[in-house]
Image (cartoon, rainbow, N blue to C red):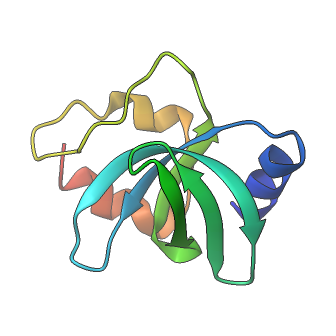
Amino acid sequence: MKNFLLKQKMMNHPVDIIYMDKKGHTTYRTIFVKKITNDKVIAFCTLREQQRTFELNRILAAEKASMLRMETKITPGSNLMWISRRMMLPEHVEVLHKFH
């Protein structure tokens, strides 16, 4: 995941992510990566329209962004079929299946 995000940063490509916050709320966001540390990603978030810090271990999935998609909140029952195309950490697959 980290290498993928670094590559997108170097190419200045936006990245679509699925992010779970500390309260367990999951959102879909488009970000522009500015900096990556060992455990954090500092990026411009188009959903919040400001720079945000994301914990790397809370990014459930990531892929090169499609500029046609809009940010949406993932809720139980949402169609998550597109997740199979995203880069995911194995430990997050089970978390995402509870929404499907």
| Quarter in which the C terminus is drawn | top left
Residue at horizontal 50 percent and vertical 63 percent from the top = 59
Q: Is residue 33 above or below residue 12?
A: below
Position of residue 49 in the picture relative to residue 100 (left or right): right
Residue farthest along the front direction in this orientation:
50
Question: Who's the residue at 44% across and 22% down the image?
Answer: 69
Q: Position of residue 80 (x, y in %)?
A: 30, 35
Q: Please determine whether, in this image, residue 27 is positioned above or below residue 51.
A: above
Residue 50 versus residue 16 in the image, above or below: below
Dividing the picture into quadrants, the one containing residue 1 is bottom right
Question: Which residue sits at x=53%, y=75%?
Answer: 57
Determine the residue located farthest toward the right in the rendered image.
10
Q: Residue furthest bottom?
A: 38
Residue 58 versus residue 14: which sits nearer the camera? 14
Q: Residue 56's x, y, as percent?
A: 58, 72
> How many numbered marks appear?
0
Residue 27 falls left or right of residue 99: right
Q: Is residue 30 above or below residue 6?
A: above
Task: Give the left or right position of residue 90, taking residue 81 as reference.
Answer: right
In percent of the image, x 48 and y 42: which residue is there?
Answer: 46
84 vs 52, nearest the viewer: 52
Residue at the extreme left of the image, as rendered: 77
Q: Where does residue 51 sit, x and y in percent of width and height?
A: 56, 61
Q: Position of residue 15 (x, y in %)?
A: 62, 41
